[in-house]
Image (cartoon, rainbow, N blue to C red):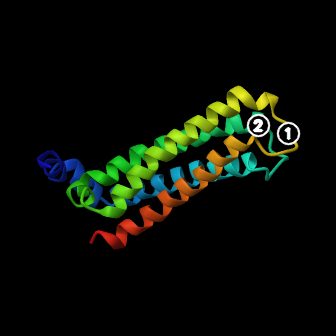
Amino acid sequence: MSTLAWLEQTEFSDWVLTAFSGFPLMLTLHAVGLAVSMGLILVMDLRLLGFFNFVSYKFLQRALLLAWTGLGINFLSGTVLFVPRGVEYVGDPAFLTKMVLIVLGLGNTGWLHGQIVSESGTWSSEVAAPVPVRYWAAASLLLWFGVIASERLIAYVGR
């Protein structure tokens, strides 16, 4: 906890909170990363569930690389947004829920991406993915919507 308190006192933390470009820039990057990553993951999940049959699995393989880039942007901007309020956030149930759901969502998305890369060549392009993959795609939808909901609740629950 003392490390988090120290981080809150740094010039960097002060820049994030008080500079004209600090907080707005990081929040904008976080929103862009969220839109890119969640939009593409949503398309992947729905395609695996049998919707959007016009979207090829080859396209999903390439699009998911962009989704991972969006998640990377979210990691970096989220870390910057965390620094000035780390002590507050580690006690916030909405923030802790978000972190758990992100870890689960990343694992799930990584597994689904691996299935698309290694197995989709054997799947019919006209139907949904195999049943086990569909279960994980449905779980992915729940996990990532949970991340978004808990992210929004951070502003209201812990304060």
Dot 2 or dot 1, earlier in sequence: 2
Q: Quadrant of residue 58?
A: top right
Would you say the residues marked 2 and 1 are in contact, meaning their CB atoms lie under 8 Å apart?
Answer: yes
Q: Residues within 10 Å of mark 1 (few under 14, many from 20)?
A: some
Residue situated in front as seen by the camera: 42 or 126:
126
Query: Among all residues in the image, which is located at the extreme right?
Result: 126
Q: Quadrant of residue 22?
A: bottom left
Residue situated in front as seen by the camera: 36 or 142:
142
Residue 61 as seen in the image, left or right of residue 110: right
Query: Among all residues in the image, which is located at the extreme front?
Result: 131
Give the residue drawn at x 69%, y 29%.
Answer: 117
Query: Among all residues in the image, which is located at the extreme top?
Result: 118
The residue labelled by disc 1 is: 125
Q: Is residue 37 above or below residue 151?
A: above
Which of the image's four quarters has the C terminus? bottom left
Expressed as whole percent of the image width and height from the top left, the position of residue 69 reads 54, 39
Visible residue check, residue 150: yes
Residue 53 as seen in the image, left or right of residue 34: right
Q: Which mark is residue 57?
A: 2
Residue 8 as seen in the image, left or right of residue 123: left
Q: Amino acid at mark 2?
A: Tyr
Q: Which mark is residue 28?
A: none
Q: Secondary structure at mark 1?
A: loop
